Amino acid sequence: MTGETVRDLLKPVIGKSGSISMLISRIGPIGFAGAEMRKLTSVELRPDGLVRLDRESGWTVIDPAEVVAVVWHSDADSTPGLFL
């Protein structure tokens, strides 16, 4: 997946309460809780091609080339989630 794709998929969930999961090749699933004090605050495509996810409680940098799938699950919804 490209950095632009990851950024564009996650921008609509900035500031929303819920969880983000990603399937990473050769590693498996990883998740980011987005509870009330851990909401995603920004998604930035860095000059080196990595994607930085900022949350109120910290930040994460991922290599988008290894991302196979992205899932957003809203806290306000009881369905199993949405594959983006």
Image (cartoon, rainbow, N blue to C red):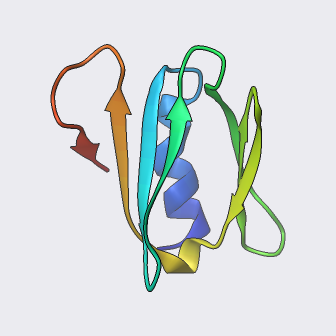
Horizontal relation, residue 34 to residue 22: left or right: right
Identify the residue at image location x=64%, y=73%. 63
Measured as percent of width and height from the top left, residue 40 is found at: 62, 32
**32 or 67, nearer to the observer:** 32
**44 or 58, nearer to the observer:** 58
Identify the residue at image location x=23%, y=38%. 81
Horizontal relation, residue 79 to residue 5: left or right: left
Compared to residue 84, the image places residue 74 above or below, namely: above
Identify the residue at image location x=44%, y=86%. 26
Q: Residue furthest bottom?
A: 26
Measured as percent of width and height from the top left, residue 68 is found at: 38, 72
Measured as percent of width and height from the top left, residue 19 is found at: 44, 35
Horizontal relation, residue 40 to residue 26: left or right: right
Compared to residue 69, the image places residue 14 above or below, namely: above
Horizontal relation, residue 33 to residue 56: left or right: left
Measured as percent of width and height from the top left, residue 22 is found at: 43, 59
Q: Residue furthest right?
A: 47
Q: How many marks?
A: 0
